[in-house]
Image (cartoon, rainbow, N blue to C red):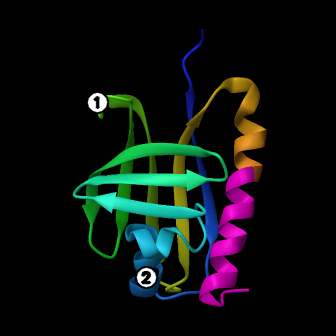
Amino acid sequence: MDPKIKYEIEFPINSSPQLLYQYISTPSGLSEWFADNVNSRGEFFTFIWDDSEEKARLCSKKSGEKVRFKWVDGNSKDTEYFFELNILVDEITKDVSLMVIDFAFKDEISEATLLWENQISDLKHVIGSV
């Protein structure tokens, strides 16, 4: 089976970086737009959607700027795949955007991109950035 391919998508978001960071770095913030429910125990986060559940480890974060979650297997061992949410602020205009870095199989990238577009749309509604 071919490995997944890394891809990046940038979304402009009308929000302060501090507010946005709360929604990408905390279980309560993530459960408002990313998954139906998010639980954390230490550095491990459990993302729950309908009937499925995925675990990831918060492997890096920079306060107010970015978070990276590495997907883990059933034994809580890191896999090679992660997703990263990176807050970008334009130095001149101060415009804020969210860079999403994720992985998908080649024939699923457009579907995965659409999923992110829907989730970021939910995020924008939650923070009033519509």
Q: Which residue is mark 2?
A: 17
Quarter of the view holding residue 73: top left
Q: Is residue 89 visible?
A: no
Q: Which mark is residue 77?
A: 1
Position of 65 with respect to 15 (left or right) is left
Assess whether residue 128 is covered by the magenta stretch: yes
Q: Nearer the viewer, mark 1 or mark 2?
A: 1
Question: In the rendered view of the protein, which quadrant contains the N terminus?
Answer: top right
Which residue lies at the image location 54% right of the left edge and 87% below the top edge? 15
Position of 17 with respect to 5 (left or right) is left
Q: Which SS class for mark 1?
A: loop
Assess whether residue 93 is covered by the magenta stretch: no
Question: Where residue 125 sits: x, y (%)?
Answer: 70, 82
Which residue lies at the image location 35% right of the left edge and 70% below the top edge? 65
Question: Where residue 30 sits: x, y (%)?
Answer: 50, 68
Q: Which SS class for mark 2?
A: helix
Question: In the rendered view of the protein, which quadrant contains the C terminus?
Answer: bottom right
Position of 112 with respect to 40 (left or right) is right
Quarter of the view holding residue 119: bottom right
For the image, the number of numbered tags is 2
Which residue lies at the image location 44% right of the left edge and 86% below the top edge? 19
Q: Establish if 14 lies above or below 52.
A: below
Query: Which is more toward the observer, 80 or 87?
Result: 80
**Which amino acid does the dot numbered 2 rest on?**
Pro
**Which amino acid does the dot numbered 1 rest on?**
Lys
Q: Is residue 124 visible?
A: yes
Query: Which is more toward the observer, 41 or 24?
Result: 41
Q: Main secondary structure of the magenta part?
A: helix
* Part of the protein shown in magenta: 115-130
